[in-house]
Image (cartoon, grey):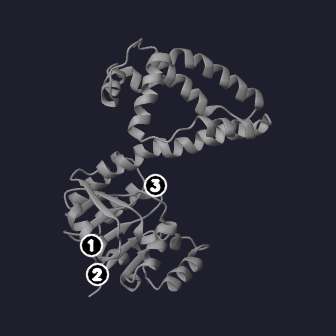
Amino acid sequence: MEQEVGLIGFGEAGSTFARAGDWAAAAHVFDIQTDDATARDAMLAAYAEAGVLPARFLEDALDGVSLVLSLVTADQALAVAQAAAALIVPGTLYCDLNSVAPQTKQAAAQAIEAAGGHYVDVAVMAPVDPARLNVPLLLSGTRAGDAEARLRALGFGKTRVVGADVGRASSIKMIRSVMVKGIEALTAECVLAAAQADVLDEVLASLDASEKARPWDERADYNLDRMLVHGTRRAAEMDEVVRTLEGLGTGAAMTRGTVARQRAIGGLGVKAPPEGLGAKIGVISAPAPLLNPASRE
């Protein structure tokens, strides 16, 4: 017998998952867009095309289901959990797949758990399209194992429990995004300036020549080593990079952050960094103000 599912949110992720599985007919779907008269007809048509059960109100989507998947916009994740807490029956598994901070998920968990539900932090670790039900999912929470079994029954093929604490899965996703989205932003800042200066080909060729593939633990260890030894000098150089980018008019937001971080770490005065990534992190983390270079300015 197909398990009944309450699906909150029918944007890209929610609609992709429902269409990819064979459980659409058992999915009771509510999306706030149905409250918008200008969007309601299009949303109802999307429900019909996907073969899901439309819910006019949130309570209709949650009525009689023991598994809830929340896939809304980040700014609505907590409000939706709080609204759902007033409607779910005790024992309901509430899987929060939204991309929000661990603190946000912990606040949502408080509301769900107080109502007798079981909150599970789920981090979606890759774009849902084209992966669909094979998108990697990390789960944490006291009932993460139960949620994993229910999600696998829906066809999700790459799930992994990473701990019993709500916020652990989302911490992995959020902190990973520092690097993933940061590299994207740095890429934009670099190539826009290079194109404006008419040196794009040369800059890219230079990056190709200098970039060497290595595991991230080795790369992070090397990068921190260089910052500890040469951070002050590199900050001064990056001040000139800021001037370069501002002169081109392409923006230097990311590079200003680089100046602050290099100067803060270089300012520790560590001439002989300790061996190993963990030891370097310990040296850098010891002075509390360093955790937020902006607080030093």
CA–CA distance between discs 3 and 2? 27 Å
Q: Which residue is mark 1?
A: 150
In this rendering, would 90 be left or right of 23? left
* Disc 3 element: helix
Q: Which residue is mark 2?
A: 3
Q: Amino acid at mark 1?
A: Arg
Mark 1: few/some/many CA within 10 Å (<14, 14-19, 20+)? some
**Residue 190's quadrant in the figure?**
top right
In this rendering, would 179 be left or right of 149? right
> Is residue 125 placed above or below 176 in the rendered structure?
below
Point out the tag, 1 or 2, that comes first from the N-terminus. 2
Point out the tag, 3 or 2, that comes first from the N-terminus. 2
| Front position among marks 1 and 3 | 1
**Residue 86's quadrant in the figure?**
bottom left
> Is residue 1 placed above or below 230 in the rendered structure?
below
Name which residue lies at 33% across and 74% down: 62
Asked whether disc 1 touches disc 2, contact meaning CB atoms under 8 Å apart, the reply is yes
Q: Nearer the viewer, residue 28 or 215?
A: 215
Name which residue lies at 53% across and 70% down: 33
* Disc 1 element: helix
Q: Which residue is mark 3?
A: 74
Percent across and percent down for residue 115 are 22, 62
Name which residue lies at 43% across and 26% down: 224
Point out the tag, 1 or 3, that comes first from the N-terminus. 3
CA–CA distance between discs 1 and 2? 9 Å
> Is residue 27 placed above or below 268 in the rendered structure?
below
